[in-house]
Amino acid sequence: MRGPFTSLDRLLLACIAFVLGAALLSYVVDPLQLFRPSRSAFYSDDTRVQNAGLIRSQTFNTVFMGTSLAIHFRQSDIDRVLGVRSLKLAMTGSNSRQQGFVLEQAIDRGARRVIWAMDDFIFVDAADIEADPYLSVDLYHGTAKGIASYLFSAAMAKESLFALLRSVPPLQGPLTRAAPFLPVKFALADVDDIYALPRDFDIAREYNAKRTLAAFAYITSPVRSRFLGEGYGYDAMVRHFERDAVGLITRHPDVTFDIYFPPYSILQFVAMRDASPETLKIVTDLTALMAQRLTQLPNVRLHDFRAIKAVTHDLDNYGDVIHHSPVVDAMVLKWLASGEHRVDPKQPTASLDELKAQVEAYRVER
């Protein structure tokens, strides 16, 4: 009778040794750099996870936050134009709870300036941050639960093993070149490349009036137009704005917040005008309140880029009705540096009033 039990014991011990070995490998390699910075680190486009490591491993005094409208900025460009040491923490599809939480962690690690691309739709209702299935609070806080989930993750063990193999000199070159095509997340050799477009990217092919108009036709189609207002509710959005934005800002009076309303194409607002006017009213009412509240906070500089007609009416600047090209990214940084289009606290809704007049007058040329 002892034979089967002995084999089972050996199997159990082997499994335990394997799991502990994988955890040790993840600790030593530390692909997220949670425990120590690495000179030969690789980075992932999974920003909700990667940001936890960046905040702990990078040196910065400024953080850059936003959704997919801010995701393609390069840290090197932010540093060069604004004269800062930045850390880009933008997350595609993120909401105000996620953004506020991540910003708080970065501020606690020393950020003294926040550049925040504040989209109106980040304030739609969302899960409480403690229950968010897409962002691990414990990983950011470095709790026992968060560290355990990191060290005992099969995915992280795989990434660690690949990183270990990539550190072997004969394999380094071939595996680094092959990484973007393999089922691994940590494939970027430079933090500046996280979610940035390749430097040889064909901008004109992906950002042009034809694509923008096609996107406009798609979202205003009668079978899809109801989605324009999905998640929009004025009272809930105001609550989220007060809690996640104003609450964060007032808790950190020694931090400067450069907040800007991104330059959507005019067609974003025209789509609402034509297909969902109640949504347009929510957006304009909400941003009027946001402008009034933010301009009264002493550590906020608010910038509104939505009524810059030379940019927002040039549909070649967009890949759809909201996502602008890297050419506009450069303009945004220039405007932030110069203070051009900064909202005057004495006239907080002046740019919004100009935008509303443009939307009312605009006619789509198909």
Image (cartoon, rainbow, N blue to C red):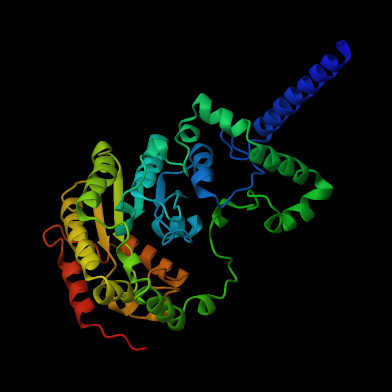
Q: Where is residue 8? Give x, y as percent.
A: 80, 19
Can you name the residue that lies furthest to the front here? 1
Task: Name above or below for residue 359 compared with residue 186.
Answer: below
Left or right placement of residue 38 versus residue 1 in this view? left
Q: Where is residue 245? Give x, y as percent.
A: 28, 46
To which quarter of the image does residue 267 belong?
A: bottom left
Q: Residue at x 71, y 43 (%)?
A: 163
Q: Where is residue 366? Give x, y as percent.
A: 37, 88
Can you name the residue that lies furthest to the bottom here? 365
Q: Residue at x 60, y 71 (%)?
A: 200
Of residue 136 and residue 141, the one placed in the foreground of this image is 136
Of residue 134 and residue 361, the one placed in the foreground of this image is 134
To which quarter of the image does residue 233 belong?
A: bottom left
Of residue 344 and residue 363, the one placed in the foreground of this image is 363
Q: Give the mark count.
A: 0
Task: Name above or below for residue 64 compared with residue 363.
Answer: above
Can you name the residue that lies furthest to the top here? 2
Q: Is residue 105 visible?
A: no
Q: Is residue 356 visible?
A: yes
Q: Where is residue 250? Give x, y as percent.
A: 23, 40
Q: Residue at x 33, y 88 (%)?
A: 365
Q: Residue at x 67, y 33 (%)?
A: 26
To which quarter of the image does residue 177 belong?
A: bottom right
The quarter of the image holding the N terminus is top right
